[in-house]
Image: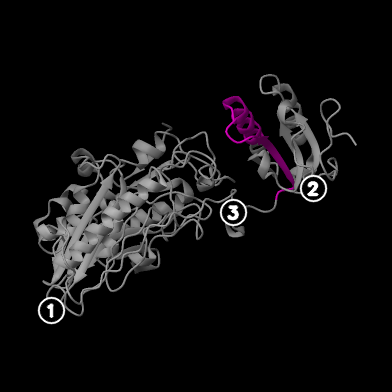
């Protein structure tokens, strides 16, 4: 782990000032179970994810901890430990859904450290995002490696540019309860309903919430539930056992029945599949489900199980009654809308990053090619080394790693192993091809980097006249340039 500076503010204004002064390298700190023990320990950094060298400890801020119940609802400080939420008798009396969800998070030791705000803002658990050797699109890179890689635990619906899955259990419960987030900034406080709090990759690739870098979640407010409200929570994990793993599918159900179970005003419930954000399906209350999945078939089975449970809760009005564990006739008048789990089709290729999240157009396109299923470690490290050297040199060159079948129509410099030199599609316009054997190509790549660093046009962002594009790829007669 790299060195960092810990700040211990005493007020929200002081914490906001520290975040504003240090910008992108400052991060709010709760219990540190994900930020410190995960992101910083594993040095997860990228072009859009700098290392957090300044941590702002929110547990020292006055007023950010505690559970305060009033006649209109309850307010929970963002720095409140999860174990206090799960063991609170006041919450269990009116909001049992929240205490069940908090009690299902990780282990008692982690719940003692982890906070409400930290659970809502934890980063995704995608293998590629959590691996420091992959500059994935979520960290500011160019590729979502889950599209063609091992995506057993990634989203099956709702994915656009990035197929991460939202990992928070409490997010599901707060959405179903109609909670509101209170956010502080230099301009003051503002309230955001949780339906609008989370954002997907199509809205912002680099974050999962609407918070700006200099904003803080200070508390969560939940309206008081009526005595006729029935609440329920279920979480299915990998083994189908009550362990503390992340969920395969989780479901939260809140049902209002003023006239008793089956009354006219009973709210509908819904179950959703694993997706990048906490879903927003609702009638007047909503039931939501999300998290990692091992396979599409497993997601269907898990979702169907949650759907059956949600249906029986709607019939019986109680998540723990005997009728919720067996089939029973539907109560007259109660509506229960269950959305089927339909796995979305996988993207055929990585989708370009939206223009608002990209840097200015590159002066040159340098592409490392490989075949699917045959990406070797040395070839990947060679790609990383070249990209790092060009970035440090300040060149406006876009370096990317793409399968042979997904090459762009125009490639200024194409780097590929000798075994692929005759397999490039003829429709690809190539300026220069570098044949670099996996085991003996380092000298050629070093010469290529030196030549690019010496080109002043690339440093100021202008296209280089050195590399004239050829229409179509010609078989190579020797190493280096494409022969006519």
Residue 9 seen in render: no
Q: Which of disc 1 and disc 3 is earlier in sequence? A: 1
The foreground one among 373 and 411 is 373
Q: Residue at x 12, y 54 (%)?
A: 88
Q: Is residue 66 left or right of residue 295?
A: left
Magenta-drawn segment: 362-389
The foreground one among 152 and 393 is 152
Find residue 399 and report its horizontal and vertical position in percent. 66, 40
The colour scheme used here is: one colour
Q: Is residue 178 left or right of residue 27?
A: left
Q: CA distance from mark 3 to mark 1?
A: 51 Å
Residue position marked by numbered label 3 in the rendering? 353
Find residue 282 and report its horizontal and vertical position in percent. 32, 69
- In which quadrant of the rendered image does the N terminus lie? top left
Q: CA distance from mark 2 to mark 3?
A: 21 Å
Q: Mark 3 and 1 residues: CB-CB less than 8 Å, in contact? A: no
Which callout, 3 or 1, points to the residue nearer the camera? 1
């Amino acid at each position: 782990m790299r060195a960092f500076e810990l700040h211990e503010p005493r007020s929200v204004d002081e914490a906001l000032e520290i975040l504003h002064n240090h910008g992108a390298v400052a991060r709010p700190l709760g219990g540190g179970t994900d930020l410190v023990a995960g992101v910083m320990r594993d040095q997860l950094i990228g072009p859009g994810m700098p290392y957090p060298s300044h941590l702002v400890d929110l547990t020292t801020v006055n007023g950010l901890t505690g559970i305060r119940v009033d006649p209109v609802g309850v307010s929970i400080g963002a720095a409140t430990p999860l174990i206090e939420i799960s063991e609170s008798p006041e919450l269990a009396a009116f909001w049992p859904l929240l205490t069940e969800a908090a009690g299902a998070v990780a282990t008692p030791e982690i719940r003692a450290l982890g906070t409400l705000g930290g659970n809502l803002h934890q980063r995704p658990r995608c293998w590629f995002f959590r691996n420091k050797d992959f500059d994935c699109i979520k960290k500011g890179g160019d590729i979502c490696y889950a599209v063609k890689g091992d995506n057993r635990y990634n989203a099956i619906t709702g994915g656009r540019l990035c197929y991460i899955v939202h990992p928070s259990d409490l997010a599901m419960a707060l959405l179903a309860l109609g909670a509101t987030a209170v956010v502080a900034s230099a301009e003051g406080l503002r309230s955001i309903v949780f339906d609008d709090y989370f954002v997907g990759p199509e809205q912002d690739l680099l974050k999962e919430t609407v918070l700006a870098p200099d904003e803080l979640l200070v508390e969560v407010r939940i309206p008081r539930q009526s005595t006729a409200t029935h609440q329920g929570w279920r979480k299915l994990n990998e083994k189908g056992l009550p362990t503390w793993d992340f969920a395969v599918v989780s479901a939260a159900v809140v049902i209002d029945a003023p006239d008793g179970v089956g009354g006219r005003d009973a709210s509908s419930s819904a179950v959703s599949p694993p997706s990048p954000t906490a879903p927003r399906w609702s009638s007047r209350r909503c039931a939501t489900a999300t998290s990692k999945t091992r396979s599409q078939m497993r997601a269907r089975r898990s979702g169907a199980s949650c759907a059956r449970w949600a249906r029986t809760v709607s019939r019986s009005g109680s998540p723990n009654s005997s009728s919720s564990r067996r089939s029973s006739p539907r109560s007259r008048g109660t509506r229960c809308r269950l959305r089927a789990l339909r796995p979305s089709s996988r993207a055929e290729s990585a989708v370009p990053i939206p223009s608002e999240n990209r840097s200015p157009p590159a002066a040159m396109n340098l592409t490392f090619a490989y075949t699917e299923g045959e990406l070797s470690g040395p070839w990947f490290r060679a790609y990383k080394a070249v990209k790092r050297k060009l970035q440090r040199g300040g060149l406006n060159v876009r370096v990317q790693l793409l399968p042979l079948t997904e090459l762009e129509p125009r490639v200024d410099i194409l780097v590929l192993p000798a075994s692929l030199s005759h397999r490039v599609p003829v429709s690809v316009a190539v300026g220069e091809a570098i044949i670099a054997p996996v085991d003996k190509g380092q000298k050629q790549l070093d010469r290529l980097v030196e030549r690019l660093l010496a080109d002043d046009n690339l440093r100021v962002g202008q296209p280089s006249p050195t590399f004239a594009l050829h229409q179509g790829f010609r078989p190579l007669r020797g190493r280096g340039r494409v022969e006519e």
